Amino acid sequence: MIMSRIILLIFLTYSFCQDDCQNGRYNSEFFDVDIEYEIQYGQNINQTIVGSQFTENLYMDIYSPRGDEYNERPIIFFLFGGSFVGGSKSSSDIVALCTKYAKRGYVAVAIDYRLSQHLLFFNANEENAYKAVLKAIHDLKAAIRYFNMNDELYDDYGIDVNRIYVGGYSAGAVTTINAAYLNEYEEIPSFLYDDYEQIGGFEGFSGNEGYNSNFHGIVNLSGAVGNKDWIIENDIPIVSMHGNQDDTVPYDDNLVTLFGLNIIVDGSYVIHQRMLELGNYSSLHTYVNQGHSPYTNMNFEAEFSSLFLYEIVCSSDFMLGDLNQDDKFDILDIIELVSLVISNQYNEAGDMNQDSILDIIDIVLLVNIVLEN
């Protein structure tokens, strides 16, 4: 009986691990990198600096681990900084981050997003600042939807759509953080209500409609959220790096003053404290007595953030055998598995021997576990 329980425990522990999380993958750099440049992922209306409208095509560069035969890889998006008025996906920090993540086994994507020079240079106010952020959020979500669409129709990039992550520096970080935590209509500032539908709500009109835009973790370099109260229990994990003397994007709960704006936001320190108070997964590295850009070659930043993400990338969101997700093994799980086998349906939580088929062998293995408990 004791030996049987030990064997079952070993079996369960092994089954929970991702097959690809071996030999330092996702923690160490050991791949060369291939890059596909200027891949169009969407388009949307934008304004020139003088305010005239035009249709902007949206492009991305895709960094992949060369020669990697694994076909279910995590994917991470990185967004550049530039105060929503400048910058590009070819900025040196974004190139470095994408390269370092691809060397670790990720598919890494650098996207361009629409800038808002007219809104912020000539009519800077809180409403236009939020609109600038929402435009970037819409473009990010379109890029995520692009890969969900491609995975379903073509599978060109060998990604796992259940392991999607986003990150950025400065304005790029502001975009990713707010894309994660600004997700309820009641959270939207009232001055945006009239334009909410016209600008596309939370998802926007930048392309690939009908596909999922969810993501599962954030890499934040010098970013902030509009309001810490948007963060709730079990919210998206975040790893943050920020200088505590940042006078561009506040480290704590201070003002953004660019372009003459005076907008209170909650920076990385406040985000981290809020996450910990709620029992959420979060990590913060503070660059003491440093400003907005304390980064050099991104070696430390890639190491620090990838170690954090590893715990998400290489964990399972379910307990094998717990088909009704009540955190225990009992007759109800057996009934559910029998029903799936009879109806020829698949649920990974019931695939006890991990052969991608639900059959009598899985039922027997689950029955043994229930009896042992």
Image (cartoon, rainbow, N blue to C red):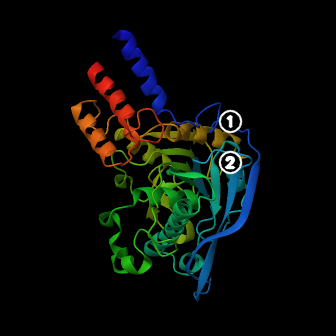
Q: Residue furthest bottom?
A: 52
Residue 362 visible in the current orientation: yes
- The disc label shown at residue 102, or none: 2
| Front-most of residues 41 and 94 | 41
Q: Please tell me which of labels 1 and 2 falls first in the chain.
A: 1
Residue at 61 percent across and 79 percent down: it is 56
* Residue 108, percent from left and from top: 64, 53
* Residue 106, percent from left and from top: 63, 47
Label 1, label 2: how many angstroms apart (C-alpha)? Answer: 10 Å
Q: Say which residue label 1 marks.
A: 28
Residue 257 visible in the current orientation: no
| Front-most of residues 187 and 153 | 153
Which quarter of the figure is the C terminus placed in?
top left
Residue at 47 percent across and 69 percent down: it is 134
* Residue 86, percent from left and from top: 65, 69
Side of 356 where 35 appears, left or right: right
Asked where in the image residue 111 lies, by quadrant, the reply is: bottom right
Q: Relative to 349, does residue 165 appear above or below in the rendering?
A: below
Residue at 63 percent across and 56 percent down: it is 157
